[in-house]
């Protein structure tokens, strides 16, 4: 069955192909290349290995990877593993797998922890220049001294320690002579700066924790704002592109590279985060969903993680197309998840093989069809791709139809099977309702029909018109499988606008997954492999699950559920 494209969806398709093609970041890179400010574009993607990548991460990957490839440059993957509290090799391996799946293969893979020695040496260099000092204020005191957005901060009483004293204390920090939180190393900048990030920020803290790569070699760890610009500079990154929340951190980024004195300093540029309707991107909350069993792991198909989207049936191409269509700009916005659904739907309409599935089966017995007769009707595998050919679907006396295609008390203009009515079986005969048999509990046991045998799969000989067409399966040509129907995990559209007295938990969708058991699927699906995708005619697009062998997951409905 070929999916009909609605007018609204066609408008969206045109929008996805035409608007937002301008990218202010590529304008910057082209200007830098033309002016000779850089000789080769060099970008990086620096995830922290404390969770799984999500759809928001895909935007950063897309920007950095495609920019480097567009201009013949280099693209690094660098793990920002400078905080050992929640980092793990599990996440490292998952991130590598996600980039491989997306096709964004890095030219080099680095780890921030491999720069610990150099970062430490640069910290010592700043101390010697009088640009950093060891501070004994605890967290609460530091907040008190920091000031507010309208009031300047106050200098720490330890700010004027001598270079020699600071070097000695920092060495003791490194040697493990102080407990966690006893003191920090702070950059000496300006406690009256209107930018709170410049008010003598901490650049090293004490953590007596084993590191997933360095073991117990270090008990002091650099903070992100200090380590990140150093890592960019050491790798020769020319354009350090990150999300907009780091815009206020850029002056500190520039201060670090300037005061350390790199000959070829990198520059930071920011873009708007990818916010999607009915979706939460917080790693902390996503981890909570996993640990409390609300979802079936990080790859639960309701999650926004890349491994979940992969398991559900999304393709790398559809995800990158979604990011591109959403646009690369600096203004904050929330993108309708329907755009992502459109991208995969448009792809699968062209590529997915058509198969028949009966989600809520009702048995139909065709009274005037011979008991021992069987025949085959030829049905297209994909009308949009003639190379996929056709297949023969078996027809017998006893078939299944979907419960949605029958009504004992039909509403007006109901064109499916009903008492006294006729309906076309897709690709086969016209059948007419005759009777219904109920079970003792009042459920339908079977429906008795007669077939217009002369109609075949053509029009009736008497010229009458039958409006309804439904899908079907022969009783002995199907398999039993479970089908999971996925919906949004959250009922609130803009998850960034939750009232103060509410939490994400208050908006969890109780119908985010509907599990249908005992579904009847076309027998040829018996050999489907994990990840294989199909259009279940008249129902939607589905993917064979990679975790449970007897399950097919709905990727997306056949048509948009809402106008754009």
Image (cartoon, rainbow, N blue to C red):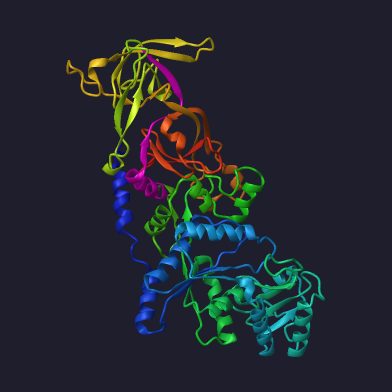
The residue stretch that appears in magenta: 339-366
Where residue 197 appears, as percent x and y from the top left, is: 60, 73
Q: Is residue 221 visible?
A: yes
Q: Please, is residue 492 above or below residue 193 in the view?
A: above
Whether residue 77 sits left or right of residue 151 in the image: it is left
The number of numbered badges drawn on the structure is 0
Whether residue 453 sits left or right of residue 365 in the image: it is left
User: Would residue 363 be counted in the magenta stretch?
Assistant: yes
User: Would residue 321 be counted in the magenta stretch?
Assistant: no
Where residue 168 appears, as percent x and y from the top left, is: 78, 85
Whether residue 167 sits left or right of residue 293 in the image: it is right
Pick whichever, 261 or 165, lies toward us.
Answer: 261
Name the image quarter holding residue 189. Answer: bottom right
The residue positioned 42% from the left and 21% from the top of the image is 475
Q: Please, is residue 326 above or below residue 451 in the view?
A: below
The residue positioned 38% from the left and 41% from the top of the image is 562
Q: Is residue 359 visible?
A: no
Q: Please, is residue 9 above or below residue 173 in the view?
A: above
- Quarter of the picture containing the N terminus is top left
| Extreme-front residue of the structure | 372
The residue positioned 50% from the left and 31% from the top of the image is 481
Whether residue 459 sits left or right of residue 408 in the image: it is left
Where residue 56 appears, as percent x and y from the top left, is: 50, 57
The residue positioned 55% from the left and 59% from the top of the image is 95
Where residue 507 appears, as percent x and y from the top left, is: 56, 43
Name the image quarter holding residue 322. Answer: bottom left
């Amino acid at each position: 069955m070929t999916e009909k494209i609605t007018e609204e969806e066609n408008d969206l398709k045109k929008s996805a192909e035409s608007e937002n093609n301008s990218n202010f970041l590529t304008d910057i890179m082209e200007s830098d290349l033309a002016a000779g400010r850089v000789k080769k574009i060099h970008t990086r993607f620096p995830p922290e290995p404390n969770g799984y990548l999500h759809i928001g991460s895909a935007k950063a990957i897309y920007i950095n990877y495609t920019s480097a490839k567009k201009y013949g440059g280099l693209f690094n993957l660098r793990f920002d593993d400078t905080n050992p509290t929640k980092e793990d090799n599990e996440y490292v391996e998952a991130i590598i797998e996600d980039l491989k799946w997306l096709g964004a293969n890095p030219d080099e893979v680095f780890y921030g922890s491999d720069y610990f020695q150099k970062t430490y040496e640069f910290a010592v260099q700043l101390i010697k220049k009088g640009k950093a000092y060891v501070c004994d204020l605890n967290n609460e005191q530091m907040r008190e001294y920091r000031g507010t957005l309208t009031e300047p901060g106050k200098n720490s009483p330890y700010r004027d320690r001598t270079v020699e004293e600071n070097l000695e204390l920092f060495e003791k920090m490194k040697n493990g002579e102080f407990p966690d939180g006893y003191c920090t190393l702070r950059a000496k900048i300006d406690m009256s700066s209107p930018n709170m990030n410049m008010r003598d920020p901490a650049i090293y803290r004490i953590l007596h924790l084993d590191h997933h790569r360095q073991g117990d070699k270090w008990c002091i760890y650099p903070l992100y704002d200090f380590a990140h610009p150093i890592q960019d500079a050491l790798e020769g990154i020319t354009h350090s592109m990150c999300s907009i929340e780091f815009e206020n951190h850029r002056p500190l980024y520039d201060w670090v590279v300037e005061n350390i004195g790199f000959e070829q300093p990198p520059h930071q540029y920011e873009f708007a985060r990818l916010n999607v309707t009915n979706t939460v991107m917080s790693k902390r909350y996503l981890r909570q969903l996993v640990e409390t069993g609300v979802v079936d792991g990080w790859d639960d198909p309701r999650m926004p993680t890349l491994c979940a989207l992969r398991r559900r049936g999304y393709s790398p191409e559809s995800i990158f197309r979604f990011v591109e269509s959403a646009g690369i700009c600096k203004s904050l916005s929330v993108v309708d998840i329907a755009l992502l659904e459109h991208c995969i739907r448009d792809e699968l309409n062209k590529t997915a093989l058509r198969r028949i599935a009966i989600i809520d089966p009702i048995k139909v017995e065709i009274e005037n069809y011979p008991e021992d007769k069987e025949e085959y009707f030829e049905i297209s595998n994909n009308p949009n791709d003639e190379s996929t050919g056709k297949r023969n679907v078996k027809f017998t006396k006893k078939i299944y139809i979907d419960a949605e295609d029958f009504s004992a008390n039909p509403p007006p203009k109901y064109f499916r099977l009903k008492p006294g009515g006729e309906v076309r079986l897709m690709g086969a005969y016209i059948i007419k309702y005759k009777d219904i048999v109920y079970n003792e509990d009042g459920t339908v046991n079977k429906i008795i029909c007669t077939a217009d045998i002369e109609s075949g799969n053509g029009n009736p000989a008497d010229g009458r018109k039958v409006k309804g067409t439904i899908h079907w399966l022969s009783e002995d040509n199907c398999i039993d499988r479970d089908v999971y129907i996925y919906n949004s995990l959250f009922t609130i559209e803009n998850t960034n606008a939750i009232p103060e007295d509410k939490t994400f938990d208050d908006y969890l969708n109780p119908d985010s997954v509907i599990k249908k058991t005992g579904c009847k699927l076309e027998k040829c699906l018996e050999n489907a492999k994990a990840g294989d995708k199909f259009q279940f005619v008249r129902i939607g697009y589905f993917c064979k699950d990679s975790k449970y062998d007897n399950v097919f997951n709905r990727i997306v409905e056949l048509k948009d559920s809402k106008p754009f």
